[in-house]
Image (spheres, helix red, strand yellow):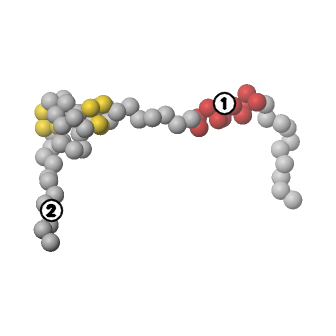
Amino acid sequence: MTPHPKRKHSKGRRDRRRSQDALIAANLVTCSNCGNKRLPHVVCPNCGHFKGREVYEVKKEKKSSE
């Protein structure tokens, strides 16, 4: 037989546990250089710019002609 709880957990205790289950949408901002959406305080993964300057160079993928 499986174990059973000795006492009933209150609704408040149950709801406090479930308060962490809600999903929140990520706060996205537009990049000032390329206009794509990115996370705030993070370098743009599309163009490599942050706060108006280039942090790292993004290498463009070459298309293969077949």
Toward which corner of the image does residue 34 lie, by quadrant?
Answer: top left
Q: Amino acid at mark 2?
A: Lys
Camera-side residue of 37 and 14: 37
Count of labels shown? 2
Q: Mark 1 Cα within 10 Å, few/some/many (few <14, many 20+)?
A: few
Residue 5 in the image: state x and y as whole percent: 83, 44
Residue at disc 2, secondary structure: loop
Q: Residues within 10 Å of mark 2 (few under 14, many from 20)?
A: few
Q: Amino acid at mark 1?
A: Arg
The label nearer to you, 2 versus 1, is 2
Residue that sits furthest to the bottom in the current view: 66
Q: Seen in the image, is 55 located left or right of residue 39? A: left
- Expressed as whole percent of the image width and height from the top left, the position of residue 56 reads 15, 44
User: Which residue is label 1 attached to?
Assistant: 16
SS class, disc 1 = helix
- The residue to which callout 2 is attached is 63
Q: Quadrant of the C terminus?
A: bottom left
Identify the residue at the far front of this view. Answer: 66
Q: Is residue 64 left or right of residue 13?
A: left
